[in-house]
Amino acid sequence: MTFSGQSQPKLDEKGRLILPAKWRESLGDGIYLTKGQDRCVSMYTATEFSKISERLESARQTTKAARFFVRNFMASAESEAPDKQGRITIPGHLREYAGLGRELILAGVNNRIEIWDLATWNDFMAQQDSEFSDLDEEVIPGIF
């Protein structure tokens, strides 16, 4: 499944958010939430998380950075299943890690959905937008 686009749900007092209808069917069999890069929460389908887990098993455990990354990524991962209203609960430790307030943004980022505090996202994107047009040649040559 490829995720794209954005949605702006609100986090309720119990730490729940309503998944956007456009993504619910793809996420219906269960999801995994874990720490994402840049202080967001990453949401994966169960299938995608399983693929990542298998690849992480082959990471060189003799490399300190690999051990730290695998440990942090996997230990922070939580399995969730949407309820009948399409809501999921974001565990407290992940809300704290990402600094999530009531206003959120969900961003589809290819194989995952990133959950950001809206103010943090806006600050991050303000910095990134000015550099975006120059990144394709440096980061991903030949794509466009």
Image (cartoon, rainbow, N blue to C red):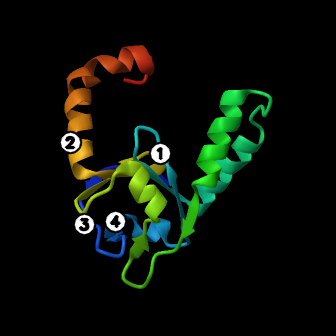
Q: Is residue 79 above or below residue 135?
A: below
Q: CA distance from mark 2 to mark 1?
A: 17 Å
Residue sitting farthest toward the bottom: 84
Determine the secondary structure under disc 3. loop
The amino acid beneath tag 2 is: Asn
Q: Nearer the viewer, residue 93 or 1?
A: 93
Q: Residue at x 29, y 17 (%)?
A: 134
- Of the two numbered discs 3 and 2 on the same chain, state the one appearing first in sequence: 3
Q: Nearer the viewer, residue 91 or 133?
A: 91
- Of the two numbered discs 4 and 3 on the same chain, state the one appearing first in sequence: 3
Image marks 3 and 1: residues in contact by CB distance under 8 Å: no
Residue 130 visible: yes
Q: Is residue 40 left or right of residue 130?
A: right
Image marks 3 and 2: residues in contact by CB distance under 8 Å: no
Q: Quadrant of residue 101?
A: bottom left
Q: Residue at x 78, y 38 (%)?
A: 58
How dense is the environment of label 3, judged by Cα within 10 Å: few (below 14), some, or many (20 and up)?
Answer: some
Determine the secondary structure under disc 4. helix
* Residue 22: mark: 4
- Of the two numbered discs 1 and 4 on the same chain, state the one appearing first in sequence: 4
Q: Residue at x 71, y 36 (%)?
A: 67
Which percent across, then down, holds residue 80? 53, 70
Residue sitting farthest toward the right: 62
What residue did someone put label 2 on? 122
Which image quadrant: the C terminus?
top left
* Residue 10: mark: 3
Q: Is residue 132 left or right of residue 76?
A: left
The amino acid beneath tag 1 is: Gly
- Foreground: disc 2 or disc 4: 2
